[in-house]
Every structure is written in structure tokens, then in C-alpha cells.
Amino acid sequence: MITEQARIKIEKVSTSKLHNLAEEDLQFGKVFTDHMFVADYIDGEWTNFKITPYQNLSMSPATSFIHYGQSIFEGLKAHTGQDGKVYLFRPQANIKRMAMSATRMCMPPFPEDLFLEALKELLSLDKAWMPKKDGSSMYIRPFMFGTDEYLGVKASDNYRFMIILSPSGSYYKNPVKVKIETNFTRAVAGGTGYAKFAGNYAGSMYPAKLAAEEGYQQLIWTDGKYHRNIEESGTMNLMLVIDGVLVTPKLNDTILKGVTRDSILTIVRDWGVTVEERTISVEEIVKALEAKTLEEAFGVGTAATIAQISTIGYEGKDYELPNVADRKISGKLSKYLEDYKRARVQDKYHFLEVIE
């Protein structure tokens, strides 16, 4: 439910921090704009819709999400178009996915129409923060967490929903070296792997740390039961090109339904590329690496868009992949998606939402 007072109240900053923005030195997710959106779920309804100056939160040490992990989030981007307008990339897909995550974590989904309204209002207010260079974007982080002050294991009755904005540079500046993980598990059948649940990411950090000590920037996750089949790459969906065919693991409840994944599959099918969404075994990958038929490997996700993989490690052996400059499908996709998000090409698939 939504209260009758659903109009968003706006409190602007008295002094902007915009003068501190150095676009040429932007990193990912370290700079935040002047304002943020906040709403609360209290007594069974969403209320207190407001945009306020970006600020720290004050909460009780007993706040439930701190102890029991009821916390979800999304990630999407806006780009400056060649016409100077601001373009959101597929916001409805992220809004629907966050509702799915909320349902899985026993949380009330935030109303879709108000979600988009708040997002547009916030972006419009902080439009001057939009970076303009290729490779940069306004990264958008909506998130929700339980706010009950109660030390009992149960779903919170009350929640806070927020959106913050971060002008960001590239997530990965160079191709990454990854390791096929056959001990630790990211997600299991019947679990929360398909949701943007904070705990999924917390659990992945220790194995990623161990891999980093071996010189790898990320992991290729395998199934939690036998570690025979591949699933995701780090925090991204994984795509491979084997003998000219684009192959990616089919979706299930252990794999996130990536918006970038879906966008890429839509585009390449339209280009006439053969696509296979199916089970991919570790054995198949190793054989393709040894036979030199694995032509491209890359992670796909909102933060990085396309993260090229240069090396795949398995059981103590590293396999080098073909030079990134020679990769026909992922190389073409990288340029096309950058142009698409900046409205340099026709919005053929109706992915863009303009902020007037």
C-alpha cells in the first residue's frame, strides 16, 4: 500500500559539492552526488517520500538488517547522450528484478511507478553531476533494508528504501585473470542466488580473497553440488564464444537474471549470431581451451558492462585466451552498447528512458 501523501518532498542542499568532482579521475562507486531519495515502510504502507541532501544514517544498534541480513539492492546506469540529454538504460527491468528480490527476502516491493518517478526526479535534480566521457556513467544504487529494532529472528515489519547516485569511471580498466572455483560455492539450488541479496556478495569475498592471493582478479563459480558446471563469473554473468557460437549458462535459481545479459542476447541474436543458453561443464571449457576453440570469454553486468577475460586458471594451470583486440563479438558489443546508451544509434530495442 501507499499513503495518500505520495508526493515526493524535496529538500535541496544549501551548498553543492559539485566543485569537487574531477571527471578525469573518476573511479567506480567512490563519489556521490548532492542528494538521495528516501522512503519508509511503516504499519503496512509506504510513506515519507522525500529527496534530501546526501547524508549519513542514524539507527539503533538493534536494527534488524544488521543482525539478520534483510538487505537487497540493485544497480543500473544513466548516460549523457550526444544530444546532452540523460538516458536511463532499461530501468523497468531493474525495478522488476528488485521486486523479485524483495519477495524472496520477505520484504514489501517498492511500487514500480513511484520507483521510476523517484529515480527520474533525483537524476533531474543532480543532472549537473552526469559524467560525459565514454566509459563513464552515473551509477545508480537503489537499496532496501529492514528497520525493526528487535533482536528476534523474523522478517522485519518496517523497511527503508533509498536511492543514491555515484558518477563513476570504468569498473575494470584492463582484462581480468580468473580462476575456476571448485571448492567454495556462491549459490545453491533453492537458495538466494537469483536475488540481489547482500549476503550473496558477502559470502563470495573470502574465496575471492584467496584467489587474489594467487594472482587472480575474479572467480568463475561452479555449481554448489558437484562443481562440474559453470555458473557466474565473479559478480557477473559469464559468456563464452566457442567455435563462433556465443554460449552462456542457462538461468536457474542459482544465477542472477542479468539485465546486461538479456540485452546482449537480444542484440547478438538480431545480428545473426548463434546463441546457446545451456549447461556448460568445466570439462568442456578446459577441452576448448586446450583445443584453442574458446575464442572469447567475458563477464557481463551493469557495473562493468563487458569485462574481458584474458586468462582462465584451473587446477594450477593457466590458459591464455586470444588477444582482446581480435575478439569480434565482444569487441563489437562493447562499442555498440556504449553508442546505444548515449543515443548515438537508433533505440531499436526500446531500451532507453530519457530524462527531460
Image (spheres, rainbow, N blue to C red):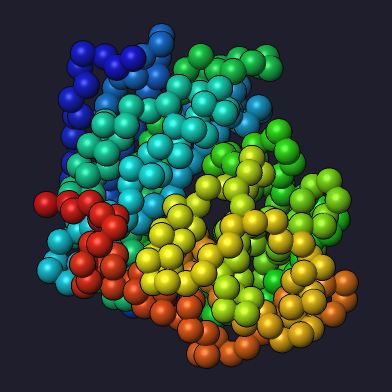
Compared with 65, 186 (above or below) is below
The residue that appears at 47% across and 72% down in the rendered structure is 273
Location of residue 62 in the rendering, given as x and y in whole percent from the top left corner: 60, 22
Q: Is 164 on the left or on the right of 119, as rendered?
A: right
Compared with 234, 202 (above or below) is above
Q: Is 149 on the left or on the right of 114, as rendered?
A: right
Residue 342 visible to an observer of this rendering: yes
The residue that appears at 61% across and 71% down in the rendered structure is 240
Q: Is 6 on the left or on the right of 274, as rendered?
A: left
Location of residue 47 in the rendering, given as x and y in whole percent from the top left corner: 31, 19
Front residue of 325/147: it is 325
Location of residue 213 in the rendering, given as x and y in whole percent from the top left corner: 78, 70
Front residue of 170/258: it is 258
Quadrant location, the N terminus? top left
Residue 208 visible to an observer of this rendering: no
The residue that appears at 75% across and 71% down in the rendered structure is 285
Front residue of 346/68: it is 346
Q: Is 338 on the left or on the right of 204, as rendered?
A: left
Compared with 341, 173 (above or below) is below
Location of residue 347 in the rendering, given as x and y in whole percent from the top left corner: 23, 62
Residue 281, quarter of picture: bottom right
Front residue of 55/171: it is 171
The residue that appears at 36% across and 78% down in the rendered structure is 335
Spot the residue most to the top: 43
Total labels drawn: 0
Residue 57, quarter of picture: top left
Compared with 189, 352 (above or below) is below
